[in-house]
Image (cartoon, grey):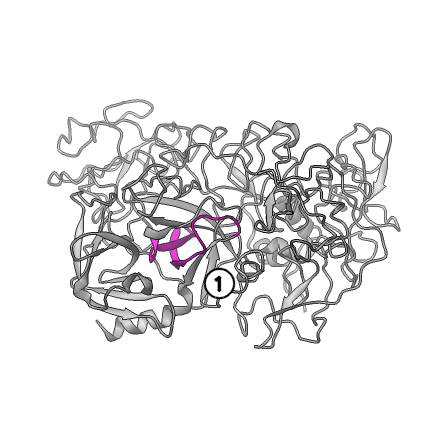
Amino acid sequence: MMLFNYPRGAFGTLLNLLNKKSKITNQSTHLLLLRHLILQYLMECVNGIGMDYRGTKSKTNSGKTCQRWASKYPHKPNMTPSTHPKADLESNFCRNPDGDSKGPWCYTTDPDTRWETCNVQNCSEECMHCSGKNYRGKISTTENGYTCQHWNAQKPHNHGYIPSALLEKYLEENYCRNPDGDPRPWCFTTSPSKRWDFCSIPRCTSDPPRVVEELTCATGDGSAYRGTIGVTASGKACQVWATQTPQQHNRTPDNYPCKGLELNYCRNPDHEKMPWCFTTDPETRWEYCKVPSCGDVPGPDYAAPPPAEEDCYVGDGTDYRGMVTETISGKRCQSWSSMTPHSHNKTPQVFPKADLRRNLCRNPDGDRAPWCYTTDPSVRWEFCSVNRCPTAPKPTPKPDKHDQPEPKPSQAPSDDSRDCKVGNGGTYRGPTSMTMLGVTCQSWSAQSPHQHASFTPESHPDKGMESNNCRNPDNDVNGPWCYTTDRNQKWDYCQIPDCAGLKCGQPVTKPRRCFGRIVGGCVSKPHSWPWQISLRTNTGVHFCGGTLIAPQWVLTAVHCLESSKRPSAYMVVLGTHTEGANEPSKQERKLEKLILGPGETDIALLKLESPAIINDKVLPACLPEKDYVVPPGTECYVTGWGETQGTGGEGLLKETGFPVIENKVCNRPAYLNNRIKDHEMCAGNIEGGADSCQGDSGGPLVCHAQNTFVLQGVTSWGLGCANAMKPGVYVRVSKFTDWINSQIKMNS
């Protein structure tokens, strides 16, 4: 039975739209319903000779870059988008428009080589090249006979390899895959007693993909570096990869046959951030190497510039250097140095001045706003969820909605200057001066570009209309508005959050989301983490952190309560930015009850004697869904007044952001060696330097998704503070949501 009767070429049209870097508008409902089919259509493998291949590989067998199909240089093509309109000759991606028996091919950018075939793996091929990173076969049994657990299942084993969050890893069904740089594909098993196991997949007899070797410098993560540097960044000699002394390991030439593990040269066989090696120092297992970046562009260790006070962009965002890594639809950005899932030429080497670090939103090509390629294979790129700065008007053409609002009776004046509104915002006097569509407001006293007489500082002297801030002088039911600086849009509403009924995890003051380090001092914007509490002795001395999760409830760590189990021994301070807690916004609460977590877990609930007053400076964080596992690589944030080891910012709330690390990786011998339990999670930078420390115990680890901060972890323990290869360990809150909710219900 046919689901829909589509006109011929509709599917190809959708693919063309999704693969172009151009805005998609007016998609039909039918096309949107087809979107879920695209993942299979865009697989980076071929069926048969690959005439239907629509992936994004753009290099030939010998590593030459493909010429664009529409280009006439350096080779005048016989096959173009106009001569073969159904072959999807998009960009410079490998295709097979003429049914060549060897599969997809392309014209090359090498004047001496007109065309070459591309090495695209066969979808049905039950063999692997190298370590099986690109294996897309259907083997679903491990080498020891265990059946693989489906990747989208969390039983019997919880894990962070969630297919919807890691689309570029092709975690389909329960097929063996290698998403984390292990020696070969593996899977979680359906046996409760065996968490995961390697799969036995034969090596392909065909040639592996060619690597364009980099001999004197490295691009991206340095996986193509084949130079002869053999010492680490600290000067330690590298251990020969083929030996097991002094460090025993499985990063051997046999396990990683395509990674150039010759002698003791620095390499990156397993998707680390840069080349590294095991060291000959028995006390130091491994370290990164200092390999020059090709083209003198910033390498992975490039220090980020100081974060701006506002994570917003000016003009078209060409100079935007913020830290947003999410698109307007909530998709995660692809790293600029990565070619997976989307091949492209917007690399740090091609655009050395565009600050194309990691997967941060940028605008290297002068588009109308910051954007990024996405990790969704079916959506090539999107604009990012970054607001335009209030001081930088850049009108966007829009149709008129209706004439100016009719005058309404005046409201009583108010001195409420908070950046949130009560009710319909008739008393709003905050600083916002931009419409919900990002257009700067016209000054109320101005008559250009829009003339008006109904709403001016003279006609409404008590409405706070001295500048161009959003106001509601006519008591409009939809809230504050303003005349705009866009000639095509006379007026529009402003997006002002409610003071009453503030939502959990959505602070009025937006955080910096800074990737500095708590050890090193990255001071937060005041009250941008309004769920952060200070747990103190009854004499007022701060010693631990915690998280407000409801007006009368705080979550912290059990080990913070070791000195006494009496509620009267402690107090909680909320609404402060300074450890000294001398702000007018401070709220103090004594404790009514301590409730320790089940078993030996490091989690505890604190019931306040009276509920906190929820406002723009005191707000709960959201709790996660039951048993939710944060995908690896997700950027999360810790906050606290902890130890900064004399590096500045003492006494002020600090923040740092770093990625979540999957428990399977964190439990490797080189890291925390099987110390992490299922009810725990780890996060941090493997090279160290950013971590939560002593004074942050019990504090929050929050992760940002869909414009909301969710409490995923309670700071628990670690080996030292910000040490390399020793990420911080956090209680996984999603494992305790039932316990939290039941305790609150029983004790309320």
In the image, is residue 732 above or below residue 17?
Answer: below
Q: Which residues are magenta?
A: 696-725
Residue 502 in sight from this viewpoint: no
Reading the image, the residue beneath label 1 is 629
In the image, is residue 411 above or below residue 489?
Answer: below
- Identify the image quadrant of the C terminus: bottom left
Q: Nearer the viewer, residue 364 or 565?
A: 565
Rendered location of residue 241, percent (x, y): 72, 50
Judged left or right of residue 372, residue 532 is: left
Rendered location of residue 639, percent (x, y): 35, 49
| Element class at badge 1 | loop
**Picture residue at 39% right of the left edge, 54% below the top:** 702
- Identify the image quadrant of the N terminus: bottom right
Judged left or right of residue 231, residue 565 is: left
Q: How many marks?
A: 1
- Amino acid beneath label 1: Val
Judged left or right of residue 234, residue 212 is: right
Task: Verify whether residue 722 appears in magenta.
Answer: yes
In the image, is residue 584 above or below residue 541?
Answer: above
Q: Nearer the viewer, residue 211 or 318?
A: 211
Crowd rating for badge 1 (residues with CA inside 10 Å; few <14, some 14–19, many 20+): many
Rendered location of residue 10, percent (x, y): 67, 51
Q: Nearer the viewer, residue 389 or 399?
A: 389
Task: Verify whether residue 699 appears in magenta.
Answer: yes
Task: Name the outermost residue toward the left.
Answer: 412
Judged left or right of residue 279, residue 525 is: left
Q: Nearer the viewer, residue 657 or 539?
A: 539
Q: Quadrant of residue 95?
A: top right
Residue 312 in sight from this viewpoint: yes
